[in-house]
Image: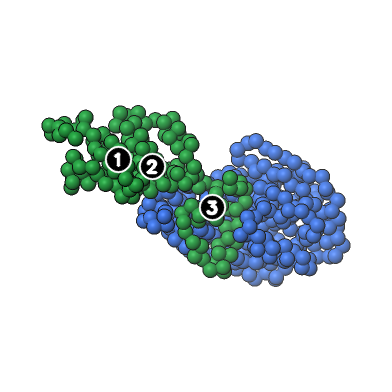
Chain colours: A blue, B green
Amino acid sequence: MLSELADDIILNILWKIEDDPRDWARLSCVSTKLNSLIHDFCWKNKTSLIIPSQLLVSSSQDHSLHKLPFCCPGLVHAGILFNTADSPEENQHQQSITSSSSTPSCSLVQQSNECSTYWSLYDDLYHDTLYADSESNHQQEQEESKENEIRTGVVDVPPESKKIKVNGSLSSHLATGKWTLSREQGSKLLARQFRDDCLYVCDWPGCVHLEEKRKYRVFRGVFMNFKKTRVWKTVNDCSNRRKIDLPCAFCSCNHTWDLHSAFCLRRGFGYHDDGEPVVRAFVCDNGHVSGAWTDVPMYT
Amino acid sequence: MAQEASSSTSSKTISLKTGDGEIFEIEASAAKQMKTVQRLIDDLGDDITIPLHNVFSKELPKIIEYYKKDITGEITKDFEAEFVKDLNDDEVKVLFLAANYLDANKLFEFLSQNIADRLESKSVEYVRKYFGVENDFTPEEESKLREERAWSFRGIKEDE
């Protein structure tokens, strides 16, 4: 049996499965042995080549850090689908948009660093790929929680929506574009008074999502020593209005902070005609950042 | 078997006996590439039929075929592709284990790569079955792992 093989023989095979980071992530679910081999050797080695050493040294080497270079938070966790309507009328408006746009927006792009999407608002706001049998319990839990009341700021899923297979552009998925992080990218995001905070963000353009309305360059990143940053102090001092029911894509935090409305982002990015901000970003208590750039409007 | 005068082994063949009792001939220079075989030759002499308890008549001919090509310098990408083309995942596994037992490094590396290629995009359940491992996570541990890794389960094709 292969299970009796020495660790170095198993590792020899594992090293050769490194092209697609999703393989290691899934293989670590096979058994505790594979999980520790992949964590202790495979991910550690790979991230040491990709993540700046300053950040590596100051972070705990858990799966959150390992997946950050490779995992796009998707439109959900970048807050693009997030409706922050406070009033019931606005919620209703959102619902009617949901149920009336039944025509799918189909934009298949051939370029290698674009994320191809087939997206119907009506059908599949939260539904992702079909799960294998052993994962169907997990899927069932998700279904059950969606039948609960609408929480403020969450777009509800019509119960009759059918499960269809999408490539995960809505929730977190393998990122297209570069898998490296840089402080330079992070510094382009933050307002000047936060220039001493170290934010590492994936290199430009992030994971590009072509949607019906506009193009989103979804990015992910992390603050070094987040609890010691000025950004943390700022969001923490704000009232809870800045804290929203948007879970982090990288860890188990259920809430994130809206950096745009906390005035942590660089001034002057502005808004589109429909009220969408040109840049949005959200950070969790552990310093993981998800967000998206859009193209600046040509005229105000 | 007639005994040959000793200094050159280039035309000498070695007899190998599989775990299910069949005997195969291999050139001495090819046998040299399999360190386990070479060690047995060193211990037992090259006139004796070398017993290979953990290798069987189904896979040994394939291994011999590989090393026949190796000693004449004819192993190419095309040959290797052809070599594994008609093998299913289990047959590759058996060959791989045999190459490991025989300490036949070149074949072992090649088959490691082939197994890696075959396991790409496969499901967790498939890999467990392939490696013959049990799921030894608690339900809570497994659920947490899968949730953290939900991103990696998207966009994967189904097992064939």
Where disc 1 sits, the SS reads: strand
The disc placed on residue B103 is none
Q: Residue B150: x and y, percent? A: 60, 57
Q: Are circles 2 and 1 on residues that touch, CB within 8 Å? A: no
Q: Determine which residue is flagged by label 3.
A: B126
Where residue B109 appears, as percent x and y from the top left, is 37, 43
Q: Is residue B30 shown left or right of residue A219?
A: left
Residue A3 locus on image (x, y percent): 42, 57
**Picture quarter containing residue B9?**
top left
**Mark nearer the N terminus (2 vs 3):** 2
The residue identified by callout 2 is B59
Q: Secondary structure at mark 3?
A: helix
Q: Amino acid at mark 2?
A: Glu
Q: Are marks 1 and 3 in contact (CB under 8 Å)?
A: no
- Tell me the residue at 29%/47% (across/down): B52
Query: Which chain contains the residue that carries disc 2?
Result: B
Residue B10 versus residue A141: which sits nearer the camera?
Answer: B10
Q: Amino acid at mark 3?
A: Tyr
